[in-house]
Image (spheres, rainbow, N blue to C red):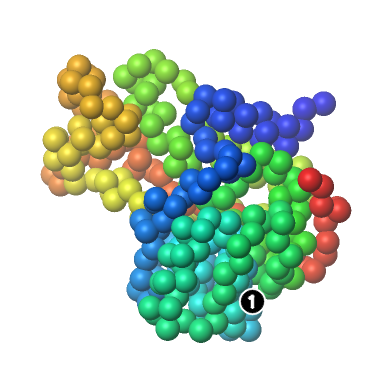
Amino acid sequence: MTTAADRYAATYDAALQAGRLFDHNRPGDRWAELAAEFRMDPRRALDGNLSALAEYLNSTDTLVDVGAGAGRVSLAMASRVAEVVAVEPSAGMREQFVASRDEAGIANARVVADWWMDCAETGDIVHLADVTYFVREIVPFITKLHNSASHRVMITVWNPTPGDVDLFPRRLLFGEAPPKWPGMPELVAVLWEMGLLPHVRPLPDHPWWLPEAAGGLSDEDAVQLTMRMLESEDDPLRERVASNMDDLFERDADGLTPRWLNAMREVLITWETGGRALMEERC
């Protein structure tokens, strides 16, 4: 019998084999050269998505942030909890986290240099953003999240995932159907299969990392966005994009909005653990 976990792993394998998914098990720091792009002011006003996460936090909580990156989420939450523990295997990301923390004068945040499955940290809340796409063995990973949180697990993913934002233009322009990343549907199916019934909450804001999703683009900017999504500078492709603008974009008085991005949203998947352990963690 094929399980939801089997289907999750098969989705991961197909994306990895097609070269569409990054394998965290490969040596080297994949994120080092990108780390600075994930650093944001910890003292900034919270956007709609972060405000939704903050609703679940208490001032006495220890917040464990799995795959914390440069602290985009957890450092912004530091003033709302007793302690932040950032679990981050990338040295480049840890460097940005520490620099951002220290420049902001945040004293209640520390960073741990571990991959999550090797980490012994526990807390009241365990949070992770954009991590599950890169995890093949999802059941032991989720089990460890659950058993490490005395109160709640909070997972955010993008729907569609960051790796799938080019699927619509590829289907339209090339007739391709590349493998998808494992995303929200596959993850929720696994949680249900594990006996967990999470609250699935779409969050309000467009991707912080893709401002073009909000629209208002000129024709030239719209073509450039599509070419960037397709990772191409080919002139014949540029002409094909320009001739398919009405299918790729919606046009209004403010400009063009990508049809394949305007409904893209971050989704919060969360549940209370109640201090009840799941099955023994399996590797």
Report the residue at 86% width, 53% height from top.
280
The answer to whether one can see residue 40 in this image is: yes
Residue 269 vs 273, above or below: the answer is above
Q: Is residue 226 left or right of residue 127?
A: left
Q: Secondary structure at mark 1?
A: strand
Q: What x and y, as percent, mark residue 224? A: 21, 35
- The number of numbered discs placed on residues in the rendered structure image is 1
Q: What residue is shown at x 76% (from left), y 53% (from top)?
A: 143
Query: Measured along the vertical axis of the image, is residue 258 above or below residue 115?
Result: above
Query: Considering only vertical position in the picture, is 145 above or below 240?
Result: below
Residue 73 visible in image: no
Q: Quadrant of residue 8?
A: top right
Residue 267 position (above or below residue 101): above
Locate residue 12: give its quadrant: top right
The residue positioned farthest toward the front in the image shown: 28
What is the residue that sits farthest to the right in this orientation? 280
Q: Is residue 217 left or right of residue 229?
A: left
Query: Which residue lies at the image location 46% right of the left edge and 20% below the top edge?
Result: 177
Residue on which disc 1 sits: 62
Query: For the N terminus, which image quadrant?
Result: top right
In front of the other: 103 or 50:
103
| Residue at image location 49% in from the left, 31% down from the top | 20
Q: Position of residue 68 (x, y in %)?
A: 53, 61
Q: Which of 104 and 236 lies nearest the eye of the viewer?
A: 104
**In the rendering, at what x and y percent does residue 42 appear?**
40, 73
Determine crowd level at label 1: few under 14, some 14-19, many 20+ residues with C-alpha closer than 10 A: many
Quarter occupied by the C terminus: top right
The x and y percentages for residue 270 are 63, 59
Q: Amino acid at mark 1?
A: Thr
